[in-house]
Image (tube, helix red, strand yellow):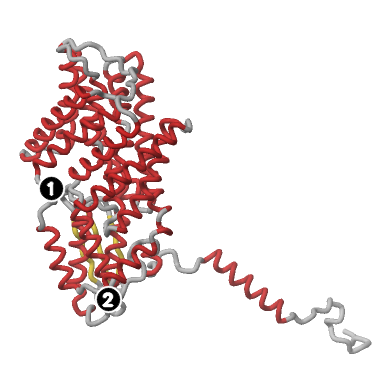
């Protein structure tokens, strides 16, 4: 081995590298940091969300935290939150509203390490502070009732807690008072409201005074039968089927007896209050907001209710055919029995009647009716523009959902309390009856009947999704409403 003739370094043959400039070093660091964010994300995928992220967009954003000695009695705080969540579910609230209420209340009362799991019938809360024994509690919801007034009062209670003006002891007392408080309207008034709604809605569809009177009387009977079946603890499926059977059979028999009253329009008004509107809106809202298990459970319950309505109509039509009832021309259209301003008045009366059946607070009835009238004019305008029978109700539902959130938060209530009664007028009761009649009687046109049912289902889902979309569109417009309400509570 011979030595090199010169003593040049062995790297002489390699290309020279220049030192990096400070700006290039910063660019490389930024690129690595961005690549790490893209690959890993800001947080691990199973890490809990911060309170700020979980309450963003809700009326309870940025709660006032009460930190004086709450962790020592965390079990009592969790018990209260579960009791509140159960009450909200019983009164018809959606999963997102229940979750944000739990998180806002527990955060305001000083609990920081809370995780909430909600399904269709249960609410679970896990409290796992660092270096302490975790607490996990579960509450099952076993019954439901119409009580929008109670739901609005729970919403106001949560607002007061988040504002920092109510401690846990007072909150427990107020929640018990809400549960024990009587509903705003007695049973006899609810029964009459069922009949009034059916009568005025038949008038909106084009029925005359005779059809409205028949719808009123048949719905009074249906309500009384449903109440008696409820006392016998009959499952809801059979109660709904019996009610839709009665409405349809009475209309068919009067037509068989010679009364010049179109049965289809009477049945359409009669079954509309049987449709699970609030449950359907909540299920669509849960699906959109990321609660698939809760949404699936509510969808199944909704489908069963629709199945019960269809089964009742089908049995009544078959029995009427056996008795000798004349065939019905379900393609018959009805001219408008009242001018546009008269229909608007009827819509307002119908929405107020729905509010009474849902036990809405008295102060919310007229604002809800106003939202319903605006939604009806939006429906009429969309129809006049030629947007079709499926798109027009969806557009009207967006308007109702948007106005419903603004009006509800201004009056201290959740959006559902205003939007659901106002949006019930958009559902296609007449189309459901026509399609079911074709499926059960005119079997040669089974494809036409199936298509009609699918079309009606699309309208119903479009209305529910439109109400949810309107609620989301109104969120930037309602941030100030929640803040003003909390400032008002703090000044008390």
Q: Residue at x 21, y 15 (%)?
A: 260
Q: Quadrant of the N terminus?
A: bottom right
User: How far separated are the C-alphas under marks 1 and 2?
Assistant: 38 Å
Of all residues shown, which one is farthest toward the right?
Answer: 5
Q: Residues within 10 Å of mark 1 (few under 14, many from 20)?
A: some
Q: Residue at x 22, y 82 (%)?
A: 69
Q: Is residue 221 above or below residue 448?
A: below
Q: Quadrant of the C terminus?
A: bottom left
Q: Is residue 485 above or below residue 463?
A: below
Could you say which quadrant of the image residue 107 lies in? Answer: bottom left
Could you say which quadrant of the image residue 420 lies in? Answer: top left
Residue that numbered label 1 is attached to: 185
Q: Earlier in the sequence, mark 1 or mark 2?
A: 2
Q: Residue at x 36, y 50 (%)?
A: 403
Q: Residues within 10 Å of mark 2 (few under 14, many from 20)?
A: some
Q: Is residue 140 left or right of residue 28?
A: left
Q: Is residue 69 above or below residue 127?
A: below
* Foreground disc of the pair 1, 2: 1
Q: Percent from the top left, x then y, of residue 157?
A: 22, 64
Residue that numbered label 2 is attached to: 110
Callout 2: SS: loop
230 vs 7, nearest the viewer: 230
Q: Is residue 199 above or below residue 62?
A: above
């Amino acid at each position: 081995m011979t030595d090199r003739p010169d003593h040049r370094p062995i790297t002489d043959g390699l290309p020279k590298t220049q030192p990096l400039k400070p700006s290039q070093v910063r660019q490389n660091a930024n690129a690595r940091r961005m690549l790490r964010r893209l690959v890993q994300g800001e947080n691990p995928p199973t890490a809990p969300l911060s309170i700020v992220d979980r309450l963003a967009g809700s009326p309870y954003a940025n709660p006032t935290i009460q930190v004086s000695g709450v962790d020592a009695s965390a079990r009592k705080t969790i018990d209260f939150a579960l009791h509140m969540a159960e009450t909200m579910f019983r009164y018809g609230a959606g999963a997102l509203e229940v979750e944000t209420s739990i998180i806002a209340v527990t955060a305001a009362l000083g609990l920081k390490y809370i995780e909430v799991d909600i399904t269709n019938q249960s609410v679970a809360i896990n409290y796992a502070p660092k270096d302490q024994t975790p607490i996990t509690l579960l509450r099952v919801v076993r019954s439901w009732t119409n009580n929008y007034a109670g739901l609005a009062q729970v919403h106001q209670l949560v607002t007061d807690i988040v504002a920092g003006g109510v401690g846990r002891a007072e909150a427990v007392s107020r929640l018990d008072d809400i549960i024990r408080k009587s509903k705003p309207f007695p049973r006899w008034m609810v029964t009459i409201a069922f009949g009034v709604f059916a009568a005025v809605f038949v008038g909106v569809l084009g029925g005359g005074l005779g059809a409205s009177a028949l719808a009123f009387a048949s719905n009074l009977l249906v309500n009384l039968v449903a109440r008696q079946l409820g006392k016998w603890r009959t499952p809801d499926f059979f109660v709904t089927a019996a009610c839709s059977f009665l409405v349809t059979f009475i209309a068919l028999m009067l037509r068989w007896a010679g009364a010049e009253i179109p049965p289809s329009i009477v049945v359409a008004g009669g079954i509309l209050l049987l449709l699970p509107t609030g449950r359907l809106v909540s299920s669509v809202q849960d699906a959109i907001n990321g609660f698939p298990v809760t949404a699936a459970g509510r969808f199944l319950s909704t489908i069963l209710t629709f199945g019960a309505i269809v089964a009742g109509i089908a049995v009544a039509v078959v029995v009427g055919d056996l008795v000798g009832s004349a065939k019905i021309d379900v393609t018959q259209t009805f001219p408008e029995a009242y001018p546009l301003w008269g229909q608007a008045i009827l819509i307002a009366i119908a929405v107020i009647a729905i509010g009474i059946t849902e036990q809405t607070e008295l102060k919310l009835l007229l604002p809800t009716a106003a939202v319903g009238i605006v939604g009806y004019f939006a429906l009429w305008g969309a129809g006049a523009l030629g947007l079709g029978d499926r798109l027009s109700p969806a557009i009207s539902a967006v308007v109702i959902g948007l106005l419903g959130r603004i009006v509800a938060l201004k009056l201290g209530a959740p959006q559902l309390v205003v939007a659901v009664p106002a949006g019930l007028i958009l559902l296609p009761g007449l189309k459901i009856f026509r399609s079911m009649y074709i499926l059960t009687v005119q079997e040669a046109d089974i494809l036409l009947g199936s298509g009609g049912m699918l079309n009606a289902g699309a309208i119903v889902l479009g209305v529910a999704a439109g109400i949810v979309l309107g609620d989301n569109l109104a969120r930037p417009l309602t941030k100030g409403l929640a803040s003003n309400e909390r400032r008002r509570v703090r000044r008390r």
